[in-house]
Image: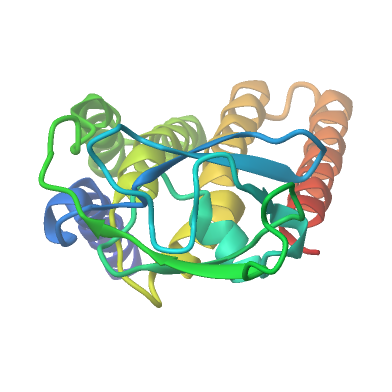
């Protein structure tokens, strides 16, 4: 094992352990105090309180409709995080509805601390990370590294997505999940396929490469179409 190989293995180990412990290193999770349901028209959501005992954020009422197409890219991405840090702010553009005449058309809400930590840490992801670490140190060919990359992508998804990171880290957190982590598993699968084929089927290998390039491009175009206005 050369210096470069050792450095790559150490870097991969540190990254996987850091990601695995990210939900513990992050602050106490927050909660928006409201539930998002599908709205009456495309690109809208209906707000409702999570329970009768939890007051709605100031300026919002149960049944208010939010026009998500008018939200900023930052707010739209952050609102998709399943876990947020206390104090995280969102500006919600409210759609016109009966009874809202003269009311504010935009309301800022902030997440409050949630003391309920049940289900906070995704333990089910640790086996994937541990297997990836084993392959990082013991793998000897492209198939092993491809399986390691696939397992790393699968194992990193939930811990990174559920970590309640505060601003400004919550935005790159979401982008990292959508544009890097999800593609790691797919690229790892590509490495496994090409490694198993070796030099025995060059035409099939080229066809697989072209198919994956097309699928990667389609994914990014679709993702950008969802995230950008």
Residue most toward the bottom?
168
Spot occupied by residue 83 in the image (x, y as percentages of width and height)? 34, 48
Say which quarter of the image contains residue 111.
Answer: bottom left
In this figure, which colouring scheme has been used for the structure? rainbow
Q: Position of residue 183 (x, y in %)?
A: 60, 44
Find residue 60 and report its horizontal and vertical position in percent.
Answer: 49, 56
Of residue 212 and residue 144, the one placed in the foreground of this image is 212
Image point 67% across, 59% down: which residue? 94
Seen at 80% across and 22% down, the residue is 201
Please state the total of marks drawn on the protein image. 0
**Residue occupying image coordinates x 33% and y 36%:** 139
Q: Quadrant of residue 18?
A: bottom left
Instruction: Compare residues 91 and 200 and report the one nearer the observer.
Output: 91
- Pick whichever, 137 or 158, lies toward us: 158
- The correct choice, above or below, for 139 with respect to 162 in the image is above
| Location of residue 180 in the rendering, given as x and y in whole percent from the top left corner | 55, 54
The quarter of the rendered structure image containing the C terminus is bottom right
Q: Residue at x 66, y 31 (%)?
A: 194
Lateral position of residue 44 relative to residue 161, left or right? right
On the picture, is 9 further left or further right than 197? left
Quadrant in the picture for residue 74? bottom right
Q: Nearer the viewer, residue 23 or 64?
A: 64
Relative horizontal placement of residue 47, taking residue 113 as reference (left or right): right
- The quadrant of the image that shows the N terminus is bottom left
């Amino acid at each position: 094992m050369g210096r470069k190989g050792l450095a790559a293995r150490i870097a991969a180990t540190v990254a996987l352990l850091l990601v695995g412990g990210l939900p513990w290193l992050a602050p106490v999770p927050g909660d928006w105090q409201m539930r998002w349901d599908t709205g009456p028209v495309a690109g809208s959501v209906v707000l409702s309180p999570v329970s009768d005992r939890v007051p709605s954020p100031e300026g919002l009422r149960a049944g208010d409709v939010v026009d998500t197409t008018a939200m900023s890219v930052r707010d739209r991405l952050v609102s998709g995080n399943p876990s947020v840090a206390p104090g995280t702010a969102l500006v919600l553009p409210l759609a016109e509805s009966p009874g809202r005449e003269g009311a504010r058309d935009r309301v800022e809400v902030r997440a409050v601390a949630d003391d309920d930590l049940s289900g906070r840490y995704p333990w089910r992801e640790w086996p994937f990370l541990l297997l990836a670490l084993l392959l990082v140190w013991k793998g000897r060919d492209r198939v092993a590294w491809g399986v390691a990359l696939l397992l790393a992508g699968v194992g990193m998804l939930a811990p990174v997505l559920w970590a309640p990171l505060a601003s400004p880290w919550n935005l790159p957190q979401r982008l990292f999940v959508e544009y890097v982590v999800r593609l790691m598993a797919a690229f790892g699968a590509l490495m496994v396929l090409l490694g198993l084929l070796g030099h025995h089927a060059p035409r099939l290998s080229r066809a697989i490469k072209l198919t994956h390039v097309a699928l990667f491009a389609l994914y990014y175009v679709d993702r950008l179409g969802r995230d950008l206005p």
